[in-house]
Image (cartoon, grey):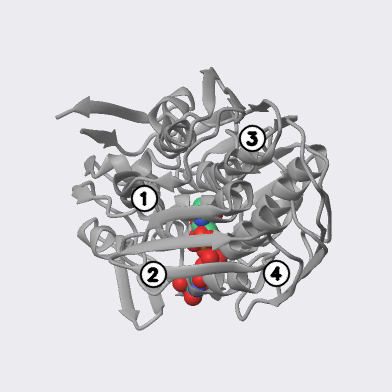
Amino acid sequence: MSKLIIDGGQRIIGEIKVQGAKNAVLPILAATILADGESVIHNCPKLRDVDKTDLVLEQLGCVVKREDGTVSVNPCGLCGCQICEELMRQMRSSIIFLGAIVSRCREAMVSMPGGCPIGLRPIDLHLKALRELGVEISEKHGYIHCTSKGIHGANIHLDFPSVGATENIMLAAVISDGVTTVSNAAREPEIVDLQNFLNSMGAKITGAGGSFIRIEGVDKLHGSEYTIMPDRIVAATYLAAAAITGGEILLSRVEPRDMRAILHVLREMGLEVKSGKNTIFLKSRGPLKSVHTVRTMPYPGFPTDIQSPFMSLACLARGTSVFVETIFENRFQHVDELVRMGADIKVEGRSAVVRGVEKLQGANVVARELRGGAALVVAALAAEGRTVISGTEYIDRGYENIEKYLHSCGADIRRVDI
Ligand code: UD1
């Protein structure tokens, strides 16, 4: 357990190479079990959730090796089809293994993922789609038991473009008889990354990045070497850190095309933003301006994951900004903590009205979930005096060495063990 101690008021000025994307690496590591040989995955961020995913792979019988940012997975000794309850509770996203395990072993057993602080996060869309692909599913005593005599192609329509459900379908259907189509598929860049990885293993998938994905089932996949895409949410968090402190930052190893909605809001707030091929440069040009409305939407809309760090920006902007959270019902938990730091925010249902204040003050605050925690770090960088953030284990789920990167750009930030 640790706390982050931030003495606010230092401008963030510098350069950051952005880490690989957490939300891309998890489904890609799950996909490695489908191969007949070893896969080597580069640019894996050093995160607790990635370590847990490695543990899941080992429990299933894979040989996993990690060296710096490279994880190699050899699934040849795969012998298990079950993920233990403890790991399922620690990492809800291990539900993403369901499609891959049932495809590979014709059986899968996982415990129901526990409730998550940001909302109910049901998995009905995942299970409905797997049933359409020929998987029999029973739910008993908190466990989901899947069996299959072989996955067959199906035309699946998702009622909502769920990221996880789209990935689970791709993982289940990639080795199958026939063709599977997914309409109203999620369009997130991480799904394109999964498609590219699977195709590099010999899959025949087209359409990712659009709403209609076509998966022509193949008999087998081979191991592959692949580099994970950059993390657009981490990139946006560091842009927010520079913006709130009146600083300037150059991000490299980013993909600006995946961040259009985010960069648009930053420009609306009065920041100078220039994108290059794999770089983004941001510079402050005076006080932040409020934004009319930020509405979280599935990609290519504004990401729910960056709503909270951008709310911290709005706290110090001139004028009133409105944030509408349409994806997760409980994603305003950072609000009470920001108010503790002097912010003026009123929440009504799924909307938060933020009136800009002159300054924020340091306080003792608690991170209650990953992105809400990042929002507190962003706010603390600009606050007067000292902020002590506990609940850092949430922040560490998505940010590799956040204090090291921010310190290298001038922040007065350190971590203490408690
Ligand atoms: C993924 C990301 C998460 C991001 C989210 C939305 C990972 C590991 N996590 O989560 O960081 O915030 O996308 O961009 O990639 N839903 C259902 N039934 C289902 C599945 C989802 O009702 O079976 C609902 C959810 O409750 C939520 C919405 O659909 O309201 C979006 O969820 P989804 O896109 O599935 O998000 P995740 O894949 O869980």
Disc 3 from disc 4: Cα separation: 30 Å
- Residue on which the image places disc 4: 185
Q: Position of residue 270 (x, y in %)?
A: 61, 58
Relative placement, left or right, of 371 versus 151 is left
Earlier in the chain: of badge 1 and badge 2, it is 1
Earlier in the chain: of badge 1 and badge 4, it is 1
Q: Residue at x 41, y 53 (%)?
A: 371
Assign a secondary structure to mark 4: loop
Q: Nearer the viewer, mark 2 or mark 4?
A: 2
| Above/below status of 213 relative to 60 | below
Q: Nearer the viewer, mark 1 or mark 2?
A: 2
Ligand 1 lies under 8 Å from the Cβ of mark 4: no
Given the image, on which type of amino acid does mark 2 rest? Glu
As drawn, the label of residue 88 is: 1
Earlier in the chain: of badge 1 and badge 3, it is 1
- Label 1 with label 3: CB-CB less than 8 Å: no
Q: Position of residue 108 (x, y in %)?
A: 49, 53
Assign a secondary structure to mark 3: strand
Disc 4 crowd rating (10 Å Cα; few below 14, some 14-19, many 20+) is many
Q: Nearer the viewer, mark 1 or mark 4?
A: 1
Disc 2 from disc 4: Cα separation: 25 Å
